[in-house]
Image (tube, coloured by chain):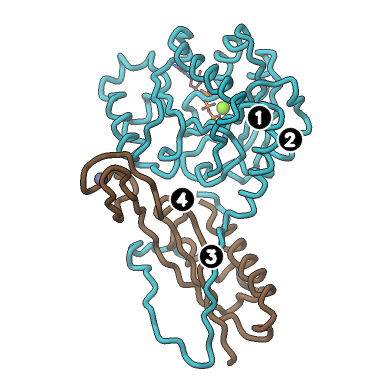
Amino acid sequence: MCNECGCGMSYAPTSRTARAATPAATPSHETVVAVRESLFGANEAVAAQNRATFRTHGVLALNLMSSPGTGKTYLLETLIPLLARIPLRCAVVVGDLETDNDAQRIARTGAHAIQITTGQACHLDATMVADVLPQLDLAALDILFIENVGNLVCPASFDLGEARRIALLSVCEGDDKPAKYPTLFHKADLMLITKADLLPYLPQFEPARSEACLRALANHSPCLTISSMQPETLAPLVDWLVREHAALKQPAHAWKAV
Amino acid sequence: MHELSLCQALIATAERQLAARPEHAGRRLKALKVSVGALSGCEPDLLMHLFPHATPGTQAEGAELKVEFQPAQVACNACGERRDVSANQLACPACGGNNVSLVAGDGVFLTGLTLSDD
Ligand SMILES: Nc1nc2c(ncn2[C@@H]2O[C@H](COP(=O)(O)OP(=O)(O)OP(=O)(O)O)[C@@H](O)[C@H]2O)c(=O)[nH]1
Ligand SMILES: [Mg+2]
Ligand SMILES: [Zn+2]
């Protein structure tokens, strides 16, 4: 996926289950030291700092994750003016492998948009987000949208310090995505089915089937079907955002530690 | 996903764990044991494949990587069942309910270091 290796060696996967280590007797000149440490620990430590920063400033940080082209940027372009009327003040951090096109599009809404160009990295990590936070006036913000790199695999493993994770899936992608990418969808706090205006052309896509796949992941989060071409369909999403933002003010708000 | 950076994190973690155990100073790191969860996003085979490329010049050079695959495991909050399940079917296999807690299979952990005197 990430072209990180480039070793040119052939790669032949064997069965996952064939990997279980066989317990063998330990020779007398050997010692087995038992430890337990997460290999994502370094990222998680930075994510915890980001989370604390957002909490201090009462900013609702949201991590938007989907395949490329699901409509993350277009949604933000449509949504931010609706939120401005409430008023909820928004800013966006957006990750892409190349170009600052998305930041430019979002900046036209008047919201502060910061592009992170990741080059080879196909996901954002907590340090990339921490590095751009000084550019934001957090005290003057209500919601920070973090648009992750379009990718359903890697972003799922990297906590950014967000309060909530939003997984998007467009009607063009097939309705069983949650079953195919459980790592990403099982942790989503909201699932959005996007491009609903195209549903008449894609009768084979059944939103109910997507939701059933999400429920099979024991995920009870809300699932909304929206179209950024039809702003009235965004009303339930606006309500969700208003509620989540209001909940921040309550001490009982469950700040998610992944 | 990021198996090469995970290999690097693995080696750094192992070196840090060894540094914290001066009683083992001078012994050779013979094997590293890792648990890879079904919902971790990490591919065990890729990890095995890339590990030898990440070890040169580190304390893990020449060491063996033992990968243990950890299936998703849920504990049912309704009926109390605790069982391994498939990664995209996390509902309780006993009662069918989906009020469950994921108790294993969500992460990648260094779980053991084999040290040798030879
Ligand atoms: N018909 C229709 N098209 C949409 C909708 N939302 C987005 N699009 C179109 O889909 C294409 C991709 O949308 P983007 O908003 O750029 O998608 P993205 O998820 O930000 O893409 P990446 O940042 O590249 O991952 C654009 O041509 C959008 O105009 C929608 O609700 N309906
Ligand atoms: Mg975009
Ligand atoms: Zn049960």
Picture layout, residue A198 above or below residue B50: above
Task: Quickly name the residue at label 3.
Answer: A36
Q: Residue furthest front?
A: A251
Nearer to the camera, A190 or A169: A190
Q: Is the residue under label 2 in contact with that under label 1 (CB below 8 Å)?
A: yes
Q: Position of residue B107 (x, y in %)?
A: 48, 54
- The chain letter corresponding to cyan is A
**Secondary structure type for disc 2:** helix
Residue behind mark 2: A132
- The quadrant in which residue A109 appears is top right
Q: Nearer the viewer, mark 3 or mark 4?
A: 3
Q: Earlier in the sequence, mark 1 or mark 2?
A: 1
Residue occupying image coordinates x 50% and y 58%: B108
Residue A93: numbered disc: 1
Figure disc tally = 4
Marks 1 and 3 share the same chain: yes
Which residue position is annotated with label 4? B41
